[in-house]
């Protein structure tokens, strides 16, 4: 499976009329957040590929409409009180934040935990305790995957980094130890994150924790792994 991974800053190589010739062979697109929805729309319309995303701690104008979305809102444009809502000017992507999603076409399981460490009173920021309980809410779906698909999850998609693995020392960019616990318990093949800007594009993006490869997907990264995807289910990938 070949995945176009994006995060934090729009990339002129992606946001280009040549996007199809450069990235037309990818299977899916994954975003770790802090990007405008119109960027996702451009990618989806240009490549016609599935896109999975979480929100970070910036570009949060429409976050509440994804988080608070109800069946009435998604189907008819009304909230539970019968009031008309303005839907985000966006369609086609899969919101993975706080969810465990299964891409049936590619046989891929993605869990998403967006947001950053709480450093002020801004939106989509969490204490370590809050992030841990966000993870705990995923356990039933992860257990279902383990029982019926032979593994817990393939990719954990986050915005922030794991603690001590490519994070930074300031409060805003400090990583979550919850992600270390997730990797230890649920053994994803990859943890993909953003948030930590790589001013030197030759800087190290990669870390390893237990059985998981941790990758900073800042701006643009191609993940090419034949072991991911359809045909690798039911324990065939060693999970």
Image (cartoon, rainbow, N blue to C red):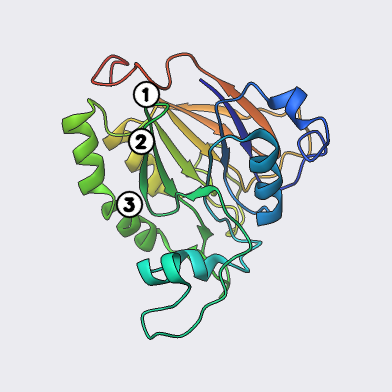
Q: Is residue 5 left or right of residue 161?
A: right
Q: Position of residue 46 (x, y in %)?
A: 70, 37
Residue depicted at 75% across the width and 45% down the height? 10
Per the rendering, the mark at residue 135 is: 3
Residue at x 37%, y 51% (from the top left corner):
99
Name the mark on residue 55. none
Asked if the residue under mark 2 is in contact with the one under mark 3, i.e. CB atoms within 8 Å, the reply is no
Mark 3, secondary structure of its residue: helix
> Where does residue 186 sit, x and y in percent of width and height?
29, 35
Where is residue 228 drawn, in percent x and y?
A: 43, 21
Q: Is residue 8 visible?
A: no
In percent of the image, x 59 and y 65: which residue is there? 88
Q: Residue furthest front?
A: 76
Proximity of marks 1 and 3: CB atoms separated by less than 8 Å: no
Please name whichever residue, 20 or 140, is drawn nearer the observer in this view of the structure.
Answer: 20
- Element marked by disc 1: loop
175 to 133, vertically: above or below: above
Q: Earlier in the sequence, mark 3 or mark 2?
A: 3
In the rendered image, is residue 142 in sight? yes
Q: Is label 1 or label 3 in front?
A: 3
The crowd level at tag 1 (other Cα within 10 Å; few <14, some 14-19, many 20+) is some
Q: CA distance from mark 3 to mark 2?
A: 11 Å
With 90 as the anchor, is 162 left or right in this view?
Answer: left
- Determine whether the residue tagged by mark 2 lies in a helix, strand or loop: helix
Please tell me which of labels 1 and 2 falls first in the chain.
2
Residue at which label 2 appears: 183
- In which quarter of the view is residue 23 placed? top right
Badge 1 or badge 3: first in the primary sequence: 3
Circles 1, 2 touching at the beta carbon (< 8 Å): yes
Residue linked to disc 1: 211
Dot 3 alpha-carbon crowd within 10 angstroms: few under 14, some 14 to 19, many 20 or more: some
Identify the image quadrant of residue 89.
bottom right
């Amino acid at each position: 499976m070949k995945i176009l991974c994006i995060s934090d800053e729009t990339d002129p190589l992606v946001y280009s009329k040549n996007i199809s010739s450069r990235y037309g062979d990818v299977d899916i697109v994954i975003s770790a957040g802090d990007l405008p929805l119109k960027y996702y729309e451009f990618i989806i319309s240009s490549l016609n590929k599935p896109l999975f995303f979480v929100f970070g701690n910036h570009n949060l104008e429409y976050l509440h409409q994804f988080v608070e979305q109800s069946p009435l809102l998604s189907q008819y444009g009304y909230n539970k009180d019968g009031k008309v809502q303005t839907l985000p000017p966006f369609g086609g992507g899969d919101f993975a934040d706080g969810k465990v999603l299964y891409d049936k076409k590619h046989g891929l399981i993605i869990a998403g935990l967006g947001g950053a460490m709480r450093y002020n009173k801004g939106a989509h920021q969490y204490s370590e305790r809050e992030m841990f309980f966000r993870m705990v809410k995923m356990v039933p779906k992860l257990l279902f995957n383990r029982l019926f698909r032979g593994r817990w999850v393939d990719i954990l998609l986050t915005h922030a980094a794991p603690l001590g693995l490519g994070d930074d020392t300031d409060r805003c960019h400090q990583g979550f130890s919850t992600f270390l616990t997730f990797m230890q318990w649920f053994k994803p093949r990859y943890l993909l994150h953003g948030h930590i800007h790589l001013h030197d594009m030759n800087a190290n993006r990669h870390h390893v924790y237990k059985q998981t490869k941790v990758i900073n997907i800042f701006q643009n990264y191609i993940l090419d792994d034949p072991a991911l995807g359809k045909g690798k289910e039911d324990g065939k990938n060693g999970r």
